[in-house]
Structure formats: C-alpha cells, structure tokens
Amino acid sequence: MPGSRTGRPPVQRAVRRPAAPRASRVNPLRRFYTRAHRAWDRPLTAYYLILGGSLLIIVLGLVMVYSASQITALQMSLPGSFFFRKQFLAACIGGVLLFVASRMPVKLHRALAYPILAGAVFMMALVQVPGIGMSVNGNQNWISLGGSFQIQPSEFGKLALVLWGADLMARKQEKRLLNQWKHMLVPLVPVSFLLLGLIMLGGDMGTAIILTAILFGLLWLAGAPTRLFAGVLSIAGALGVILIKTSPNRMARLACIGATEPRSGVADCWQAVHGIYALASGGLFGSGLGASVEKWGQLPEAHTDFIFAVTGEELGLAGTLSVLALFAALGYAGIRVAGRTEDPFVRYAAGGVTTWITAQAVINIGAVLGLLPIAGVPLPLFSYGGSALLPTMFAIGLLIAFARDEPAARAALAMRQPRFGRKRGAGGPQGPRRWNTMRRRASAARSSGER
C-alpha cells in the first residue's frame, strides 16, 4: 500500500450509505377517506347496499313487529305471535317476489308495466263496490281475502305507477318527444290523477301523498322545466289544501304537529304525544327488547304506523339511528343506480322506486318525531302489513336487477370465481376444483410407496 507524504498509511474512510427515505406521515383521516371513497366507488357497491340493507331492514322489522304486536294480539284474544306469523309469511312470499324480480330481464319488466297497471286500477275500483271493499280505521281501501287476510290495492298502485310511468317516459325519450310539454304531461298526469282519485275515494290521504311524490320524481327525472314543474306542484298543493280543509280529521292531524301534551277536543293528539313519550324514554340504548311500556295500550298502532317509536323506546337512539342509516344507504344506492345507467327505463324506474321508499320513510318517521302530520303510512319494509311489504320487496328486486345490469357490475360478477372452483372436470385459468387436486396428490403419494 503506498504511503502518504508523511509516511503514514492513508486513513480509509467508511463509505456512507444513502439514508433511507423517511416514511411520509399520512393523515389517518385522509387515509380513511381514501379507502372509503375506493370502497364506495366499486362496481358492486350499489348491489351489496341494496341487497344487504333491505334484508337487514326486513329482519329487524320482523323482530320489532313481534315485540310491538304481542300486547295488541293478546288484547284481541289472539296468540302473542299472531301478527308476527302473518308478517313472516308475507316476508317469505315477498322474498320469492324479490328473487324473481332480481332475475328478470329489463324487457320483461317493461312488458309487465301495463298488466300491473290494469290490475291495480281494477282492484282499486273493486274497493268501492259494496260487499267487496272493507273499511279499516275509517278508510275504504281494503278487500277481504277470507279469514284474517286482507289486501290493500292502493299499495300495488305505487308499483304500477313506477313501472308504467318509467316505460312511458322511456319510450317518449327514445322518440325525442319529451321536449314538448304535452307529451311530458299526457298521459302520465291524467293516469296519475285517476289513481289518486280512486285512492281519495277511500279517504287514504297518506298513500295519495306517496303517489304524488312518485309523479314528481318521474317528472324531475324527465327534465321537466321549472315552470311546468311548479305548475303541477301548485295544482297538487291546491288540491291538497282543499282536501285537508274539508276534513276535520285531517285538520286535527295537522294541528298535532309539535304537540307535547294530550289535549281535549277533536285534536287530542294522543297518538302523536305518546309516540314522543316512547322515543324520549328510550335513552341512548333503550330499555331492552320487549320492555316497551307504551305498547301496553297507550300507543295506538304500535306495530304498524308507530313501530319506529317502539324501536326508539326498546333499542334507544342507537337503534333508531341504525334504521335511519340503513334507509340512507338504500336511498344512496338507488340514486347511484339511476345516475350511472344509460338505459332510460332503468333510470326512471330506479328513480321512481327510490323516491317511493325514501318519501314514505321520511313521512312516517317525520310523523313519529312530531315534525309532520300523521299520514297513516307504514315504514317501508319495517312496519307490519303484507299489502305494503309485497310490492315493496318486488320493487327492491327491481333495484337489485338494475344494479346487477350495470356494465361494470356485470364485468365484476363475471370475473368472480366460486370459492371451491368450477364443476368437476371443468378446467379454467385456476384449474379444477381444490379437492380434485388434493386427491391427485394423495394418489401420487401412495404410488410412490407412502402409506
């Protein structure tokens, strides 16, 4: 080794290694937002939200119907599980309808629009025939099927208006006729008024409000001009004011908004006040499942229109917020399906179903909270009532079919492989089934002398 000028050996310096790059600190909230945004943007998000959210609402509704209806059934000298068994039977039939609707092609849905509309109009007209129609709680909107089974045809009118209106507006959009106001209004508005007239003959103001919301939803999706939209809204509002002013019962319900104490007179507000009592006594986590006090005769319609109040009393704020979150997720998924499709029928039908379910949920929950007048409409998929559950579950099946029919969702479903591979003997990029591979390995081991 050559020496230096001083005669000393040169000092060997250690080679410096490049410093490792410091891990950049990522904001946890930003990372959570990024992951949530990716999860929400996946192709099958709407499909899973609609399927999972609706099933959770139905299951939780069955539990609450069983809890809220026991006292009412015993007071009527019936078994405690009477209403639960009827609701469970309706849920089973509705499950079949949901599955069939989710597997039907869009063309078949459009083909069923006119038959369902004709059947709904015929049954709603039969309600007004003496000897056939029945009056329940002052509303002539029921048909007896024998025994304790009844059907409310106006609930099927919602589904009929959604399917028929979506098919009508889609055909007019394909022919580029929606830029003319007469094609946008006729015959959609006259047929809607026909359904509303048949409903109002029986005195069911709540269902009429839901049908009006569906009509406005279809007009808004069709791109109705502001003047046209405001004109139809003003006419419907004027008719609503006349119908409310001419009915003491409706005026009494309107006077109970925000009531906190029972009153004397026509507007005693008993149901509205005790609904508030039930929600107020629930606290954060409720008094426990089955431990409601208001359902012991104090709260009328505890298992139907005011089941949300019993839910708040037994499951508390956590239970009510869970129900609200499920309905919010269902509404978001429906809007997403309507916004991402290129098929006009799918857009109108998905928007109509979403308007129907969200508007009915808002009206029911708003009445229980004392923010809206009591309209007598059930909480969709949650309250007791087979006539309301069956068409609603069929409508959920429509949303599931539309969510599966998105191009990105179809591609994602096609790429999914069964967990255990394909059928026996079928090849593929991942080979045959797992147990066939293991069987070949075992036979190879035995042939080499291993026992």
Image (cartoon, rainbow, N blue to C red):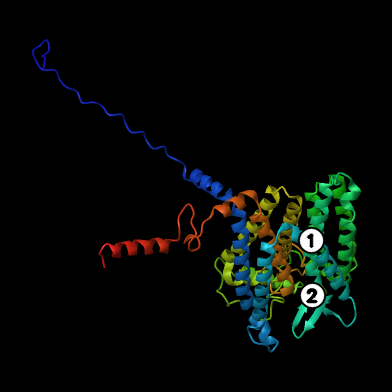
Q: Position of residue 126 (x, y in %)?
A: 87, 75
- Residue 272 is at least partly visible in this image: no
Q: Are marks 2 and 1 in contact (CB under 8 Å)?
A: no
The residue sitting at 56% across, 47% down in the picture is 37
Q: How many residues crowd around disc 1 within 10 Å: few (fewer than 14), some, or many (20 or more)?
A: few
The residue sitting at 68% across, 79% down in the picture is 86
Q: Secondary structure at mark 2?
A: loop
Residue located farthest toward the left when viewing the structure as drawn: 7
Using the image, tell me which numbered label, if any, was put on residue 367: none
At label 2, the amino acid type is Ser
Counting residues from the start of the chain, the first of labels 2 and 1 encountered is 1
At label 1, the amino acid type is Ala
Residue hosting label 1: 111
Q: Is residue 269 left or right of residue 425?
A: right
Residue located farthest toward the front when viewing the structure as drawn: 447
Q: Position of residue 323 (x, y in %)?
A: 62, 64
Which of 196 and 271 lies nearest the eye of the viewer?
Answer: 196
Residue hosting label 2: 264
Q: Could you say which quadrant of the image residue 439 lies in?
A: bottom left
The residue sitting at 37% across, 62% down in the picture is 440
Q: Could you say which quadrant of the image residue 113 lies in?
A: bottom right
Which of 224 and 75 lies nearest the eye of the viewer?
Answer: 224
Q: Secondary structure at mark 1?
A: helix
Q: Position of residue 366 (x, y in %)?
A: 71, 62
Estimate the spatial distance between the alpha carbons at disc 2 and disc 1, rounded to whole Å.
54 Å
Q: How many residues crowd around disc 2 within 10 Å: few (fewer than 14), some, or many (20 or more)?
A: few
Q: Is residue 274 above or below residue 130?
A: above
Q: Position of residue 57 (x, y in %)?
A: 62, 66
- Residue 391 is at least partly visible in this image: yes
Which of 167 and 53 lies nearest the eye of the viewer?
Answer: 167
